Every structure is written in structure tokens, then in C-alpha cells.
Amino acid sequence: MISLKQIRYFVAAAETQQISAAAVSLGISQSAVTVAIKGLESQLGVTLIRRRVGGVALTQDGVKFLQHARNIEASIADSILSMKNRESSVKGRIRFGVTYTGVGYFLLPALARFRRAYPDITIDLIEMERPALEQAVRRGAVDLALIIVSNLSEAHLLNVQMLMRSPRVLWLSSAHPLNKRSEISLQDLRSEPFVQFTSDEAPVSARRYLADIGFDPNVILRTTSMEAVRGMVATGGAITILASLVYRPWSLDGGRVEIRKLSEPIPTLDLGVVWSAERPISEAERKLVDHLKAAGAGLDIGVEPGAPPGRSPVAP
């Protein structure tokens, strides 16, 4: 029988991308993590992780099983939460504003768990660009907003609950020559073709933090399609720098995308929930904020232990 311990250990190794970091986060030995994952692989009949320079990487089977493993952990958390909430039923309706990054790469699994735990709270999702969403929160058209908080134009008018900080890392193909290096600097990337993701104000933030560190990328494509970015990178046509939050290891055609930490400190992508500072938050809204804060805590990880923290928060 597969045990919950094996599931937990595998998820920790997958999210930290290092056996040693997983062991530290779990408070156990590295050998315990390794043995648990090997046992899990034996019971499933597949290989889930492979060793690589600086840590471990998920195989295609590992990527598929990671979602199942997270669902198992989430179901257990739901069961515990439903027992704690069985004597009190919070009711309400929340107009919840979202942007591309938050809804696409963070919100949906956490929101599904929240709806199961609080069935009497109705949530209406409203997607907008960040400037319009910030205005909607301030004038009361939206109650809460999931947003890249380091892009806020008038943060002093809003209450902000930070959810997670996602490191920005280098994306490159598995066959790229730079993968053989133990350390990669921005200086190594100056002549490399670069694909620029352009949704959710990404170019604005990129110009800001790349200018701060004196790097002018050789952009050959600007696109709103994340799949186009992954495809370009996986085939070796370009590299990019994006947050680990939006990283997925495979392109649509099955190509492998690797991520590496850069030697220079690059600001993190900071995701948070905001609401107007001029009104009190309702009980239903507070439940949602607390739930998302707990969900974000498990994702606030880097590529490797000791990765340099972001400087002043600037993001997407």
C-alpha cells in the first residue's frame, strides 16, 4: 500500500527539486526521503525523479503523479477542515478579481478546496488587467483581488496580504550547452536569443529589474502565449527568465524545459490578495484570505536552497 508518508516526501522533493532541501523541510534524513520515493516508484512501476546537476528533476510520469499526490494531500486537508467547520456555516458572496498569472497558476486548486470547505460562500470571479482591477477594488466594484502586488500603483490605499514569493529563474532546453555549467550568470546570456512573455505586465517588470542589473536581452519574439514560450525554449530556439510559479517542465510537443538559478540576485514575483483600506473585511472574505495564505505558504520555495532573495519587490 502507498503511504501518506511516501506522498508527502515525494511532493516535498518535487517542489524543492532537491532531496536535501526536502529532508530539511520535513525534518528528517535525506536517506529517509530517498527510501520513501524509491518505494513509491516500485509500487507505481515507474520512475518519478532523476538526479541532475544541483538536485533532482521530475520525469514525465513524475509530473503526472505530482498532481495526483497534491490532490491526495488536498483531500486530507479538506476532510480535516470540514470537521473543524461542521458546527459553523459562514455565508456570503465575494466578488473576487483576478489577473492572468494568479488565476492560471495559483488560484484554481485552492479555490476548489475552499468551496468544498465553505459551500455557503459564493465566489464570483472577475478577470481584469491589473490597473483596472486595482481601480475596481478601490471604488468597491470588486471585494478582493488576487494580484501581483509589487506592481501596485497606489498600495497605500489598499490592504495587502502577501501569499507567496516566487523566484525568477532561467528557462532553457535540456540540451542547451549552458546546462553543463555549475553556475550561470547574466553575462553568459547576452548573445542568447530571448523569448519575452508579455501577459500580466511581464514586460514592464522585466524592463525594470533587468535594467537594474544591466542586462539587455536579445529578444527575438514577444508573445502572450505561455505555450509558445515553452515551445521556443524546449526546442532550443530561445531562453527566457520567468518566475518558477509559472514553470512547467514539458512543452505541448513533449520537449523538456529546464530551470536554473542565476548567479545575480533577481527580484521575486510577489503574489497577494488586496482589498480597499476604506472598508472592513467581511467574515467570508477573511476566510478566503486565510485559506489562500495557507495555500501560498507551501509554494513559497526556490529552485535551490540559498537562492538569493529578490530585492525590492518588482514583479511579473
Image (tube, rainbow, N blue to C red):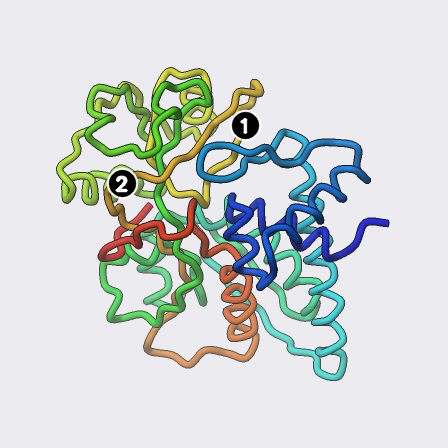
The residue located at (75%, 43%) in the rendering is: 40
Kind of residue at disc 1: Trp
Quadrant hosting residue 206: top left
Between 129 and 264, the one lying in front of the other is 264
> What number is the disc on residue 263?
2
Residue 267: % across, % down: 27, 50
Q: Is residue 89 visible?
A: yes
The residue located at (64%, 76%) in the rendering is: 91
Quadrant hosting residue 275: bottom left
Q: Vertically, is 232 above or below 164?
A: above
The residue located at (68%, 58%) in the rendering is: 74
Q: In which quarter of the image is the C terminus?
A: top left
Residue 100: % across, % down: 44, 44
Quadrant hosting residue 139: bottom left
Element assignment for label 1: loop
Q: Vertically, is 116 above or below 14?
A: below
Compared across the picture, whether 184 is left or right of 30 comes to: left
Compared across the picture, whether 37 is left or right of 300 comes to: right
Between 210 and 144, the one lying in front of the other is 210
Q: How crowded is mark 1: few (under 14 residues within 10 Å), some or many (20 or more)?
A: some
Between 230 and 56, the one lying in front of the other is 56
> What number is the disc on residue 250?
1
Compared across the picture, whether 104 is left or right of 36 comes to: left
Compared across the picture, whether 2 is left or right of 131 comes to: right
- Closer to the camera: disc 1 or disc 2? 2
Kind of residue at disc 2: Ser
> What number is the disc on residue 300?
none
